[in-house]
Image (cartoon, rainbow, N blue to C red):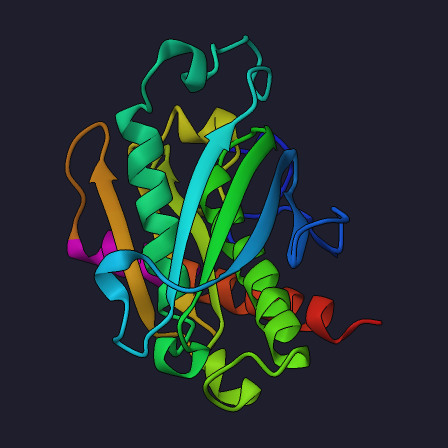
């Protein structure tokens, strides 16, 4: 069964990571996974939440949102509804957990960094694109602190590992990497995998959407995800080393 965009089962969509997309934040990245586009900004503030004061540790957290017309039909803003939805909370927490795995909070010192991930256009994989782009924005925000000698540790010790994420799934019995929306809604098994640049797992979220899945299918999906995250880590590295 051919994929909607003609890719092979183990092929990522075209990935673009554009740094400095927004003028004001200490770090900003527009990340594109095919038709999915997410703006990730990193905002630095001196100090940490009250419950963390005096610990010598910094804090990194995230907020995720989707523009009303990021999808094919308009959705009301959650601010207008007066409450943040459960899915939004879940994704925000996932992004925050994932990015904290990349940073030494002691070396960061008592500084806080908030990562805002806003989906401009959605075509599947918005949370995985957000994590991948937010890592680069976070890296730039740490660089901003380093330039002002505001870190507690050496700059190279603060961001001690890279983190990227990708979706995988089984469609018509075939394991596929980086699902677009059309595949995502048809998936028999749907999984989001967060990996470090060394191939270790930060988080694995997997669901049998239309039944159960076997151990060999799980292994195949994880192998696809690790390979995909390695490609994304290389895209991050190239973005961070470009002028």
Q: Quadrant of residue 26?
A: bottom right
Q: Residue 116: x percent and y percent?
A: 52, 44
Q: Nearer the viewer, residue 102 or 7?
A: 102
Q: Nearer the viewer, residue 87 or 33?
A: 87
- Compared to residue 105, the image places residue 88 above or below, namely above
Q: Which residues are magenta?
A: 215-224
Describe residue 72's horizontal placement relative to residue 15 as left or right: left
Describe residue 145's horizontal placement relative to residue 223 as left or right: right
Residue 118 shows in the view: yes
Magenta span includes 222: yes
- Compared to residue 112, the image places residue 214 above or below, namely above
Tell me what residue is drawn at x 27 percent, y 55 percent: 204
Overall secondary structure of the magenta section: helix
Q: Nearer the viewer, residue 98 or 52?
A: 52
Which image quarter holds the C terminus?
Answer: bottom right
Tell me what residue is drawn at x 34 percent, y 74 percent: 200
- Compared to residue 199, the image places residue 62 above or below, namely above
Tell me what residue is drawn at x 80 percent, y 71 percent: 242
Identify the residue at the far right of this view: 243
Q: Nearer the viewer, residue 114 or 187?
A: 114
Magenta span includes 179: no
Identify the residue at the far bottom of this view: 154
Q: Residue 202: x percent and y percent?
A: 31, 65
| Number of numbered tags placed on the structure image | 0
Q: Quadrant of residue 6?
A: top right
Q: Residue 103: x percent and y percent?
A: 42, 74
Residue 11 shows in the view: no
Q: Residue 47: x percent and y percent?
A: 42, 64
Tell me what residue is drawn at x 56 percent, y 79 percent: 150
């Amino acid at each position: 069964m051919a994929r909607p965009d003609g890719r092979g089962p183990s092929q990522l969509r075209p990935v673009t990571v554009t740094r400095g997309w927004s003028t004001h934040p200490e770090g900003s990245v527009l990340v594109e996974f095919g038709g999915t586009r997410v703006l990730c900004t990193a905002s630095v503030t001196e100090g940490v939440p009250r419950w963390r004061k005096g610990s010598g540790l910094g804090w990194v957290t995230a907020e995720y949102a989707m523009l009303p017309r990021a999808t094919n039909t308009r959705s009301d803003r959650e601010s207008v509804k007066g409450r943040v939805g459960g899915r939004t909370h879940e994704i925000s927490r996932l992004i925050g957990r994932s990015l904290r795995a990349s940073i030494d909070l002691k070396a960061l010192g008592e500084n806080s960094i908030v990562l805002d991930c806003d989906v401009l256009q959605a075509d599947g994989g918005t949370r995985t694109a957000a994590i991948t782009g937010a890592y680069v924005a976070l890296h730039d925000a740490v660089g901003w602190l380093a330039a002002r000698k505001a870190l507690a540790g050496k700059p190279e010790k603060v961001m001690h590992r890279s983190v990227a994420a990708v979706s995988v799934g089984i469609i018509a019995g075939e394991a596929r990497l980086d699902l677009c929306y059309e595949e995502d809604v048809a998936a028999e098994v749907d999984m989001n995998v967060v990996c470090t640049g060394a191939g270790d797992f930060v988080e694995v979220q997997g669901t049998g959407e239309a039944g159960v899945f076997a151990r060999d299918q799980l292994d195949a999906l994880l192998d696809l995800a690790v390979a995909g995250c390695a490609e994304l880590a290389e895209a991050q590295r190239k973005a961070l080393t470009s002028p």
